[in-house]
Image (spheres, helix red, strand yellow):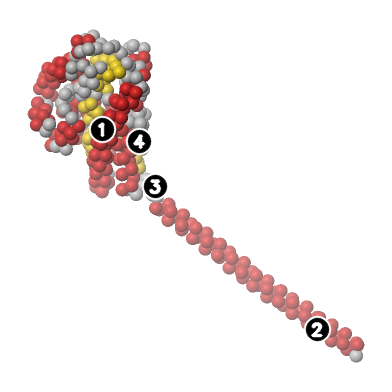
Amino acid sequence: MKKGMVFFLLSLFIMALAACGSLTEESGENGDSEQSSGETKEETDSAEADEETSEAEGSSKEAETTIRLGSHLPPSHSVIAVTEEFKDIVESESDGRIAVEIHPSGELGGQSELIQSLQVGSLEMTINDAGVLSNFAPKVGVLDMPYTFSSYEHVHNVLDSSVAETLEAELAEADIKSIGWVDSAFRDLLINEEISGIEDVDGMSLRVPDAPQYSRTVESWGASATSIPWGDLYNSLETGVADGFEGSAESIYSDGLHEVVEYRVPTEHIFTVLSLNISQQFFNELPAEDQTLIEEAGREAALFGRELAMERDEEYKGQLEEEGLQTLEVDKKPFQEAAMEFVNSYAEEEGLTDLLEQINELE
């Protein structure tokens, strides 16, 4: 009985072991199946992740076209703010397909160098003073003639008229396409010697941009004009190489030039207009869709700059006074009258008489 019971229990034990072995084998197969299924899930997850990455990359496209935009002005200047507005519009409207790189402070060269690079197509875009552009397209110099504009409103009336269209056609003949006329401000005389009138300017050495309108204007006052690169002006004033210069309040403050001159004389002799330019060669190679986008962005950015230029001009005049730059109020009329002889002769020389008349009618 006991032996039988032992044998029976032993048989049950052996059967139980066999059943466990069978379950273990089945469990092992199912385990392999689950492991295989796990690998498939990981592959699926990886594929989904790759797809999401691909979609993310697709939503911020790599630029197909890069536009370098060169300027002689410092990053803090309102004109650079206009170029940044242009950049934002172009990159947004193209969904990142077109990138704009802004190079301020003469990183790519001075104004004349920038324009020459634009003409040959080695640089895509620039923003330049009308006066310097007149060396390449003479009629554009009408915008930088002394005492041409009486107010910001007058400036805007002209830039929104057929006069601007005429000047754009003139630039196009020089392989420069203007896509926006940009405001800066009225320019004043900055000197280190106190004066009471135009007669005291006689004999002074004044720094001017490399443009005939500026040099001949200060020469009409009896001063001598010297063309010093803007970046070298601070040292030239500090060491006495120049007795003074002329410029807008913002340009003066932005480059700290008020530290090396004592007086501002509000002659308001020239209003600086700039043109946002694109290489005609580069522009012609763009698809029609991109040409339209860039032209519209240029006009929009230029309009954005109008209010900004007026605000900055008032702001910087106040800051210049706060920091000790004295304002000398003198009779502006003799400065204007002295410049008129040059204006009339230059207009006749360059065929600008009709354009000047049109500008006067828009006042």
- Dot 2 or dot 1: first in sequence order is 2
Q: Verify CB contact (< 8 Å) between mark 2 and mark 1.
A: no
Element on which disc 4 rests = strand
Residue placed under numbered mark 4 in the picture: 102
In the image: residue 20, left or right of residue 227: right
Locate residue 109: give its quadrant: top left
Residue 230 picture location, percent across and down: 32, 22
Residue placed under numbered mark 1 in the picture: 310
State the residue at coordinates (58%, 68%): 37
State the residue at coordinates (56%, 62%): 42
Residue placed under numbered mark 2 in the picture: 12
User: How far is the residue under mark 1 from the one under mark 4?
Assistant: 23 Å
- 265 w.r.t. 314: above or below: above
Q: How crowded is mark 3: few (under 14 residues within 10 Å), some or many (20 or more)?
A: few
Please state, as top left, top right, bottom left or bottom right, where the C terminus lies in the image.
Answer: top left
What is the three-letter code of the residue carrying label 1?
Answer: Met
Element on which disc 1 rests = helix
- Dot 3 or dot 4: first in sequence order is 3
State the residue at coordinates (17%, 34%): 153
- Dot 3 or dot 1: first in sequence order is 3
- Dot 1 or dot 4: first in sequence order is 4
Residue placed under numbered mark 3 in the picture: 62
